[in-house]
Amino acid sequence: MYINAVKISIFKKLGKWGWFSTGWLGARYIYRELLFPFLFAIGVVTFILLANFLIKSVDRLLGKGLAISVILEFLYLNLAWIVAMSVPMAVLVAALMAYGRLAEDNEITAMRSSGISFTTILVPGVVFGLVVSLVMLYFHDGILPDFNHRARLLAGDIYRKRPDLNIEPGYFVDDIPEYSIYVKEKVGESLHKITIYNKDAQDIQTTIYADSGFIVVEGNTILFTLYSGQSHEIDLKGLSDYRRIDFERHRIAIPVENLMLERRESARRGDREMTIKMMRAEVQRYTTEYKRITEKINNLARKELGDSTLTPDLKKLENIVKAIQAKNLQNLAEGEANRKNQKLNTFLNRIRGETSLALNYKKQIAKYNVEIQKKYSIPFACIVFMLMGAPLGVVTRRGGMTVAAVLSILFFLLYYVFLIGGEELADAAIITPFWAMWTPNLILFIIGVYLIYYTSTEQRVINFSHLPYLWRRLNHKIKTRPQSKSNRGEQ
């Protein structure tokens, strides 16, 4: 009682200074409450995601003779996208823990008793989320693309270092120079149903089939030992000289220079390896190409079908062509009609090819616009998570890690389900990139606004202890519900 009275006295004195003093003096207390859970959550989430990534990547790292510095660099470069995912979730955890602890210890009540509104109490959290958002916006645009690019190059270099370890049943392996390999089954080190052909042959094409075999790496040489198979050779120039050799045991030695790790440099970047400026340049380039193709389609349609036809829509053009072909069959001689209809079919096939190219350009534009919007929407999610997490922490009155973790995972999964689904729809040019990337933020923002209103007006507490009772009651009602007539066999 004495402690709460002191808290009320302090917050009343802060309240005399008005909103500014609360935003300055009281905010420092809330900032401290937010900082530790935020850093702690970043550490925990990053560790979990990094451990999961390491487990998935361990088969690509072990047995390749990599230096420990290369492995650490590989993990360090992939740490960037892990941090990009963990920070928004850490903001939500921090909001739930900080404001939940303040509500659990009645400090929110003390602040409100001193005349400080909940929206004023929320201001430090919003400022905290805004600062994190600005930092993450710079991170997503200035740091993450370069890390993703370097991580992809290093992963490719590691993958090619020991190609014998990368053979997977059911897939063609093209990592070994001059050869392509297909293995149907792999049991331990033994390979079964093997097909090998030299893909870069200029004079003689060799294809080898074997029932079984294995691979051994000696220095910079890969040794294939094959059993019960055939070797087929054909002269590619004359296609007349063909030779077949049956063997019980056959060995192939392939010198490979890149068994030692070679680091490459590449100017080519994927969409997730580009800055906003780079992607806007790509959008401009593809937009120019899309307009050129559209104009080309219109010119072809105008030339073949007349000046009244101006549409890049393939289905409309197909309907117009079918109508013209039907008229030709009715009004012209059979030979003349067939000649003109064949010409229209050639035109339509060309239009289909140009339309397919235009659609690919449109999808490329959508793909880059999605990544541009994502670089803004994910950092902004830090503010949205704060607006939602702070009032949710107050109404639950739980400042511990358990409730914060459960609620954070729930809402974070909801956010990423919408984000990934929106990205797929936008890449397929079904919805616009803006709505694809900003709809999750909008949904959680609406939930946050409602929770702020609910907390500011009602101040009721969500009691999670009643959930098991409600669940048992619901199950009891389902089990004791009368059966329908159809279930009882009544007419």
Image: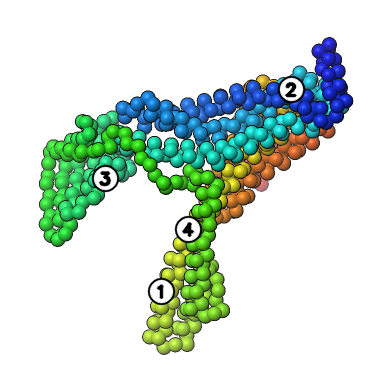
- Residue 94 image point, x, y percent: 66, 27
Instruction: Look at mark 1 in the image and give the residue it sits on.
Output: 346
Question: Which tag, 2 or 4, sits closer to the chain's start?
Answer: 2
In the image, what residue type sits under mark 2? Tyr
Question: Which tag, 1 or 3, sits closer to the chain's start?
Answer: 3
Q: Are marks 2 and 3 in contact (CB under 8 Å)?
A: no
Instruction: Look at mark 4 in the image and give the residue it sits on.
Output: 360
Instruction: Look at mark 3 in the image and give the residue it sits on.
Output: 180
Can see residue 21? Answer: yes
- Label 2: element kind: helix
In the image, what residue type sits under mark 1? Thr
Q: Residue at x 55, y 41 (%)?
A: 141
Left or right: where does residue 102 sit relative to residue 148? right
Q: Are marks 2 and 4 in contact (CB under 8 Å)?
A: no
In the image, what residue type sits under mark 4? Asn
Q: Residue at x 70, y 40 (%)?
A: 445
Residue count near mark 4 (Cα–Cα under 10 Å), binned few <14, some 14–19, many ≥20: some
- Residue 339 image point, x, y percent: 39, 82
Question: Which tag, 4 or 1, sits closer to the chain's start?
Answer: 1
- Label 3: element kind: strand
Residue 429 image-quadrant placement: bottom right
How far, Cα to Cα, is label 1 from label 3?
38 Å
Question: Which tag, 4 or 3, sits closer to the chain's start?
Answer: 3
- Residue 478 image point, x, y percent: 67, 33
- Label 4: element kind: helix
How far, Cα to Cα, is label 2 from label 3?
64 Å
In the image, what residue type sits under mark 3? Ser
Residue count near mark 2 (Cα–Cα under 10 Å), binned few <14, some 14–19, many ≥20: few
